[in-house]
Amino acid sequence: QKEVEQDPGPLSVPEGAIVSLNCTYSNSAFQYFMWYRQYSRKGPELLMYTYSSGNKEDGRFTAQVDKSSKYISLFIRDSQPSDSATYLCAMRNPDNAGNMLTFGGGTRLMVKP
Amino acid sequence: DAGVIQSPRHEVTEMGQEVTLRCKPISGHDYLFWYRQTMMRGLELLIYFNNNVPIDDSGMPEDRFSAKMPNASFSTLKIQPSEPRDSAVYFCASSLASGRPQYFGPGTRLLVL
């Protein structure tokens, strides 16, 4: 079993829908959580970064962390065709020296006009 | 800031040839990471440096792979000799400090024939 699990999709939604992307993890030591967006043939781009449990909002994006359930989510409101990309969750165990991240496999999202 | 810079963006070579990938991290970032991304295996960490010193190279697949960071603004990943199974997208990323998120470059798309 992978340390971080993410449904690969593809997830197809109509424009304007609320999108929910999720990751589960097995290592309770993970403390730092990130979401990256990767467009086709581009590098991953940092979207959200959070440390604590709860919600963090940035425009149409909300990151949610539930450490008790070992579950993180990214919500996209009023989704746009330009949101079509692969979304990768990533997390870090501060007990490990260095700054290595553990990535999920990514969820491919398609927002149709 | 220009972000992480990688070159070349695309590389096509024949099996057995030497390949050198280059990376310039974001100025002031202490950590530099080399990743490989394939459809089958997702993002894999190959090696990372802290203050120009290699810290963990356990992800380097074989002795054919080597990486150097001669100074804070430049790193190379070399494959010698290259093989078709090395075909992938190679990303370089940097981060400011331990616990901070990583920022990715645009990647080098490598095809070994």
Image (cartoon, rainbow, N blue to C red):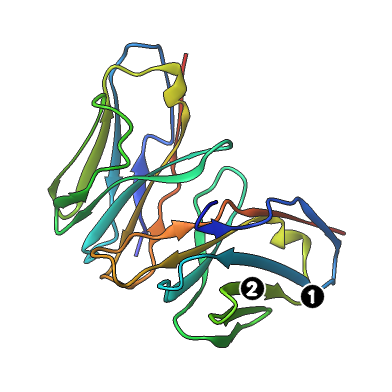
Q: Residue at x 29, y 28 (%)?
A: B62
Left or right, A88 with respect to B100, comes to right
Q: Is residue B37 above or below residue A31?
A: above
Task: State yes or no: discs 1 and 2 in contact (Cβ < 8 Å).
Answer: no
Query: Circle 2 — which element?
Result: strand
Residue where numbered disc 1 is placed: A78
- Image coordinates of residue B43 in percent, x first then y, are 48, 46
Chain for numbered disc 1:
A
Left or right, B113 with respect to A64, comes to left
Q: Is residue B90 above or below residue A73?
A: above
- Image coordinates of residue A32 in percent, x first then y, are 42, 74
Chain for numbered disc 2:
A
The C terminus of chain A lies in which quarter of the figure? Answer: bottom right
Gap in angstroms between the C-alphas marked 1 and 2: 16 Å
Q: Same chain for the residues at labels 1 and 2, yes or no?
A: yes
Query: Circle 1 — which element?
Result: loop
Q: Nearer the viewer, residue B21 or B60?
A: B60
Farthest residue in the bottom direction?
A: A54
Q: Point out which mark residue A73 bears.
A: 2
Q: Which kind of residue does numbered mark 1 sit on?
A: Asp
Dot placed on the residue nearer the N-terminal end, 1 or 2: 2
Q: Which kind of residue does numbered mark 2 sit on?
A: Ser
Q: Is residue A75 above or below residue B5?
A: below
Q: Residue at x 60, y 77 (%)?
A: A69
Q: Is residue B86 above or below residue B1?
A: above
